[in-house]
Amino acid sequence: MDLRLKGARALVTGGSRGIGAAICTALAAEGAAIATCARGAEDLERALEGYRSHGVDAHGEALDVRDADAFEAWVARSAEAMGGIDIVVSNASTRIDPSSADWWPDTFETDLMQHVRLKMLTVPHLAKSNDAALIFIASIASILTALPSYEEAYGAMKAGLVNLVGQWAVQLAPQGIRVNAISPGPIDFEGGWWDQIKQAQPEAYQRAAGMAALGRLGVPEEIANATAFLASPASSFTTGANLRIDGGLIKTANF
Ligand SMILES: NC(=O)c1ccc[n+]([C@@H]2O[C@H](COP(=O)([O-])OP(=O)(O)OC[C@H]3O[C@@H](n4cnc5c(N)ncnc54)[C@H](OP(=O)(O)O)[C@@H]3O)[C@@H](O)[C@H]2O)c1
């Protein structure tokens, strides 16, 4: 299927590794220009080289998405560098230490407020696009009620995010902007959270694999492929959806 993404302009947060990097790679391979960010400059530079190898422009800046001023300036510079924005993928999340006094406010900032901010900053650009897509990477933690205690705040914020995706789909449809969420289950990649669990607690890793109907964890490309579809005109009638990609971990029909 031709996703008709050649020449599209995509802004993706957290594109230096893991799911965000796989999303940037998938979009670049389809011919989309990339603007991305991450805190670590070295990984980011390496990732940008990879995106450029697909023959597209790739821009990146090292910054913290929770720094409102730096974030706003980066969005503006990215839009200018690409000549506009057609696709936004709000992907970045930061693990917050649950023993810190600011666990809840920090999780609110990282897993909810920065998504709200990105939506507000990018809608004026997306409204000028002929094929605008706004995608939020949520998590199946949004509906699980047997989460580990250290994911209590994370799950609640991701649930709020999915609710907002529904509201924004309705709110932004008149401007031609489609809004969707993707909720991954456990995704494994080198250096990622589940890779660390695989090394430190192999039995917990195997338990997570066994919970999925497919009997394994996913890989970032399995999230990226679906993201590229939702970002593309090939999904022109899809808005307000929350696509669970968890290998059948959640055992309910997705009404
Ligand atoms: N992996 C999973 O099993 C899984 C499951 C469900 C949902 N998800 C969701 O999928 C998304 C990506 O997950 P992932 O596992 O790929 O995450 P990850 O390995 O932690 O990578 C996150 C990316 O975002 C960047 N980042 C993190 N905090 C940032 C900040 N404050 N400012 C700017 N950039 C920041 C990271 O680079 P720096 O660290 O250099 O900043 C990196 O490029 C997240 O929204 C996560 O909640 C993941």
Image (tube, rainbow, N blue to C red):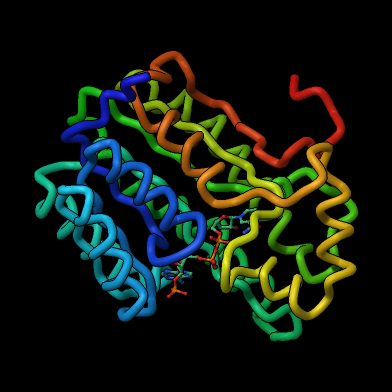
**Of the pair 94 and 192, the residue shown nearer to us:** 192
Q: In the displayed structure, would residue 42 be above or below residue 121?
A: below
Image quadrant where one finds the C terminus:
top right
Residue 222 picture quarter: top right
Determine the residue positioned at 57% across, 73% down. Answer: 191
Determine the residue positioned at 32% across, 71% down. Answer: 44
**Of the pair 235 and 93, the residue shown nearer to us:** 235
Residue 242: x and y in percent read 61, 32
Q: Is residue 121 left or right of residue 96?
A: left
Q: Is residue 94 left or right of residue 140?
A: left
**Of the pair 12 and 203, the residue shown nearer to us:** 203
Q: In the displayed structure, would residue 250 be above or below residue 19?
A: above
Determine the residue positioned at 37% across, 52% down. Answer: 118
Determine the residue positioned at 79% across, 39% down. Answer: 214
Q: Is residue 212 left or right of residue 246?
A: right
Q: In the displayed structure, would residue 235 be above or below residue 218?
A: above
Q: Is residue 93 left or right of residue 208?
A: left
Q: In the displayed structure, would residue 176 be above or below residue 168?
A: above
